[in-house]
Amino acid sequence: MSSQLLWYTTRGAGAVSLVLLSAVVILGLLARLRFESRGWPRFLSAAVHGDLALMTLVFLVLHIVTAVVDPFTHLGLAALVPFGSYYRTLWLGLGAIAFELLIAIVATSLVRRHIGARVWRAIHWLAYASWPVAVLHGIGTGTDNTALWMVVIDIVCVGAVGGALLWRMIAAPADPLADERRVAAERASFGAGR
């Protein structure tokens, strides 16, 4: 594979990874609000969220592998260790951290039934840390970070996630477990009335 093809693949896969990761974060934020319509059931929202997360991981692995094997940068496996690379140490280190956070999220999602909902939820909160770290990685190390097309992608992703976060902050109940406790109390009172 030519160095130029690797370079284009790395750039393209990185941009696609950012778009997909942004979509995953947005769906995660909206899912907490029980965002759905009568024609779009909750289980389908969860399935789309999970499938997009796995697709993000596929493009992210493509991004990393092509960057690591590219003979121009000579990154090597040291790029997978946070701040272990000689090349753009800070920015590649942020990328490695974002990747490792995503691996933790995906791995625990696959074994969710075995580790329990509380542990899974606590680790799943890492998604909210991995996204801005990934954005900073792209802005700092991306060779196209000032190209109009990449600036537009960055602005759209940041704006969309920011909008979803704002919507969640405004529309979400003050106590995220309030709905669950209300339903449990209704079930308990219904059972006691028999």
Image (cartoon, rainbow, N blue to C red):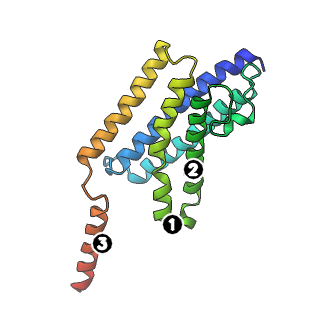
- Residue 40 in sight from this viewpoint: no
Residue 51 lies, with reference to residue 138, above or below; the image says: below
Kind of residue sitting beneath label 2? Val
Q: Pointers 1 and 2 in contact (CB under 8 A)?
A: no
Closer to us: 137 or 107: 137
Which residue is under mark 1? 116
Closer to us: 19 or 147: 147
**In percent of the image, x 46 and y 58: which residue is there?**
121
SS state under label 2: helix
Q: Position of residue 6 (x, y in %)?
A: 71, 21
Tell me where residue 57 sits by quadrant. top right
SS state under label 3: helix
**In percent of the image, x 74 and y 18: which residue is there?**
72
SS state under label 1: loop
**In percent of the image, x 27 and y 45: which residue is there?**
169
Viewer-nearest of discs 3 and 1: 1
Which residue is under mark 2? 106
Give me the C-alpha separation between circle 1 and circle 2: 15 Å
Q: Position of residue 152 (x, y in %)?
A: 43, 19
Q: Pointers 3 and 2 in contact (CB under 8 A)?
A: no
Residue most extreme to the left:
193
Tell me where residue 62 sits by quadrant. top right
- Residue 142 in sight from this viewpoint: yes
Kind of residue sitting beneath label 1? Gly
Q: Position of residue 31 (x, y in %)?
A: 37, 49
Which residue is under mark 3? 184
**For mark 3, does the 10 Å Cα neighbourhood hold few (<14), some (14 to 19), or many (20 or more) residues?**
few
